[in-house]
Image (cartoon, rainbow, N blue to C red):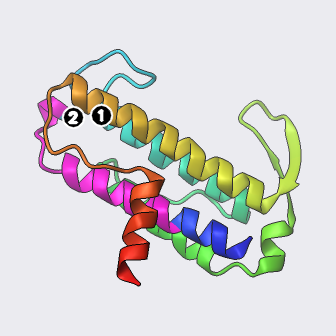
Amino acid sequence: MKDLIHQYSAYDLWANTRIVERLQREKDNVLDHHVKSSFPSLRLSIAHIRDATNTWSARIFDTPPLEFDKGIDALLKMSVAMHDQVRALTEEQFHTIVKYANSKGEKFAQPRWQLLTHCFNHASFHRGQVITIMRQLDLTDIPNTDLIAYQRLLLAKK
């Protein structure tokens, strides 16, 4: 379990880095251009990934949410913080039951590994929306953030 979750965490950081580094080349008018999506701009989509990861991290690790500036590079700071926390867990801690409440105050209890995989999957889902928005805006040099691309990169390094 530990190796798998470590890979998902590293993948999440890698994919977020690729997206943010690409979007840092765009001007504010592109980042804020209104489109039809779950979140109506690139900037708001990135902010949602950052904020949701921050919320889940606080639940998963029973810590206060982290404070970040509102720039798109804050997603990378959140990703690094999450990755560092995940890397510090023992195998046993992945199986620890975490009790938390959602935004409606409903209470739940689940193994930590399930919450982490949800968090990484959620970010991946919204990164896909970011890619779609980038295509709608006719941006070029859109990065491949597929998990398989990351796994192939790891294999090539061996």
Q: Is residue 10 visible?
A: yes
* Rendered residue at 39%/56% (across/down): 15
Is residue 8 inside the magenta stretch?
Answer: no
Mark 2 in CB contact with mark 1 (< 8 angstroms): yes
Is residue 22 inside the magenta stretch?
Answer: yes
Which residue is under mark 2?
31
Q: Compared with residue 157, is residue 68 higher up or lower down, i.e. above or below?
A: above
Circle 1 SS class: helix
Residue 140 coordinates in the image, percent (x, y): 13, 39
Q: Is residue 79 left or right of residue 142?
A: right
Residue 56 coordinates in the image, percent (x, y): 64, 51
Residue 127 coordinates in the image, percent (x, y): 41, 41
* Rendered residue at 35%/15% (across/down): 36
Q: Is residue 58 left or right of residue 110?
A: left
Task: Look at label 2 and name its amino acid.
Answer: Leu
Along the line of sight, the residue nearer the viewer: 13 or 48: 13
User: Residue 124's mark?
Assistant: none
Disc nearer the start of the sequence (2/1): 2
Which residue is under mark 1?
42
* Rendered residue at 61%/50% (across/down): 119
Q: Compared with residue 99, is residue 127 higher up or lower down, i.e. above or below?
A: above
Circle 2 SS class: helix
Q: Compared with residue 151, is residue 146 higher up or lower down, i.e. above or below?
A: above
* Rendered residue at 47%/44% (across/down): 49
When asked about the image quadrant of residue 97, the answer is: bottom right
Task: Look at label 1 and name its amino acid.
Answer: Leu
Region in magenta: 10-30
Can you say which quadrant of the picture contains the N terminus?
Answer: bottom right
Q: Is residue 82 visible?
A: no
